Amino acid sequence: MKVVTVGTGMAASEFVERLRLDGFTDDIVMCSDEEFAPYSPCVIPFYLAGEPLETVYWKGSDFYDRYRVMPRLSDPVVEVDAQRRMVRTTAGRTESYDRLFFASGARSWYPRPEWLDTHGVFGFKTLTDMVAIDRYIREHDVRQAVVFGGGFIGVDAALALWHRGLDITLVHRNTRVLSQMTDEEGGQFATRKLAEKTGLDIRLKTTVTDIVAPAGQLSGVRFSDDTTMETTLLIVAIGVSPNSEPLRGDDKGVPSDRQMLADAGIYTAGDVAVTPHAVTGEAGVYATYPNAMRQARTAAQHLLHGDGSYAGSINTNVLKKHIDFPIVSAGSFTGEPVTWQQGDIWRRVYLQDGMINGYIIIGDTRMSGYVYQLYVSRQRVDRTIGSILASPHHDAYYRQVTGCNV
Ligand SMILES: Cc1cc2nc3c(=O)[nH]c(=O)nc-3n(C[C@H](O)[C@H](O)[C@H](O)COP(=O)(O)OP(=O)(O)OC[C@H]3O[C@@H](n4cnc5c(N)ncnc54)[C@H](O)[C@@H]3O)c2cc1C
């Protein structure tokens, strides 16, 4: 049985590793639009912040050899012909399959596609982006940058470049950064503390409306308040679109069933897959590494053994990079808020019917594993949540008293 993957990212490499470790010996072909061994996008900002390139290859730079994979690199898949069980690439190559694993992830979204052609404007999504940004910073001796977008990836980008020593202006349309992973008050607190701790110039309720780029070289940006700023580096991180076109013809993602099947003989997983939420059941793209791992393992289990079922995704967000100021959240921020705050630490859960509906933990997140477990296991916590939030003892204490592995 020949297996082909579209993508060599976190989901596809986990899937292939599972197959090989579980004794699958038939042909495996992995297709990518990039040139690299499988890498983790979660850690590519560390490369930009100064870590060696090797550290991004999370399953080893010899992955293809070690797992006897035939890589087809630097050649995007443009079409999946589900009838004939075949994929076609930009270069016109075809590859037949018995089982397809479609895990093409997502790509940066640009308000104006022509920005992409400008020297000095970059997305912040792939290792290709990071290598290009790194080279550009060195070649142009860049000391300052504008990051457009203050969501998870925009803040990650701003902190990585700040860590590298650049002066950063972070521009975000909302009233607070990290607006999808916080509520208003938590987001305001996080924004204030991030600015205090790093000196980032954070401009809220602002967007980049235009760029100044004589002869195709970026020299400045114009903001929505009609001011301009000189800069030679602009990172655009205002959103992503699932790369679902080759399979679905649009960029709305790939719906899957509980076995991670999207169609006969076609599995999907990761940032391109539409899955149900484990607690609410709501279908969506839940683009995090732990979800991608569980989906890939479910698909591998089903392909090899014909069983296994995906329990659903959780919308956790964990920002713990470049600075000792972690931020963790999950679930929905509706219901009755219970808040605890001290100094640089801010913790809030939202309760509904005595159970956790969602939570935001900022500054010291060591008890977040326990809160996560209470959230997904739907336990009643209304009597104890106050002391849990205030506890200085964190996960280790709860491991001891509850015997559960948080
Ligand atoms: C900067 C950054 C930081 C992140 N940090 C975190 C974090 O801290 N925690 C967390 O949980 N998640 C984080 N994420 C998200 C996490 O990396 C993704 O959820 C995870 O990588 C999803 O795996 P995937 O295989 O679906 O996508 P990816 O790992 O992105 O892989 C997609 C693959 O598909 C390939 N591809 C795309 N189009 C085509 C095509 N047409 N033909 C062939 N190949 C194609 C790509 O080149 C790539 O190999 C981060 C993401 C980014 C960008």
Image (cartoon, helix red, strand yellow):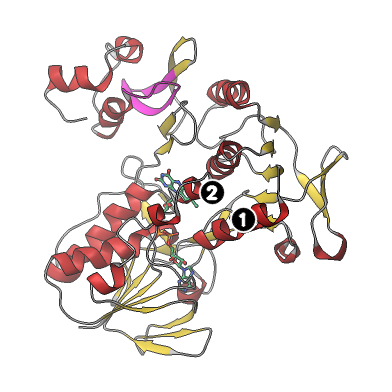
Q: Residue at x 27, y 64 (%)?
A: 15
Q: Can see residue 259?
A: no
Residue 385 painted magenta: no
The residues bearing labels 2 and 1 have C-alpha atoms spaced at a distance of: 8 Å
Identity of the residue drawn at 17% across and 63% down: 301
Please report the residue visible at 14 percent of the width from the left and 27 percent of the height from the top.
Answer: 404
Disc 2 element? helix
Quadrant that contains the C terminus: top left
Nearer the N terminus, badge 2 or badge 1? 2
Residue that numbered label 1 is attached to:
133
Residue drawn at x 46%, y 36% is 321
Q: Amino acid at mark 1?
A: Ile
Magenta residue check for 361: yes
- Answer left or right for 90 relative to 298: right
- Which residue range is magenta in the image? 347-366
Classed neighbour count for the residue bearing mark 2: other residues with Cα under 10 Å, few (<14), some (14–19), many (≥20): many
User: x and y percent of residue 401 in the render?
Assistant: 14, 16
Q: Main secondary structure of the magenta part?
A: strand
Give the residue at mark 2: 48
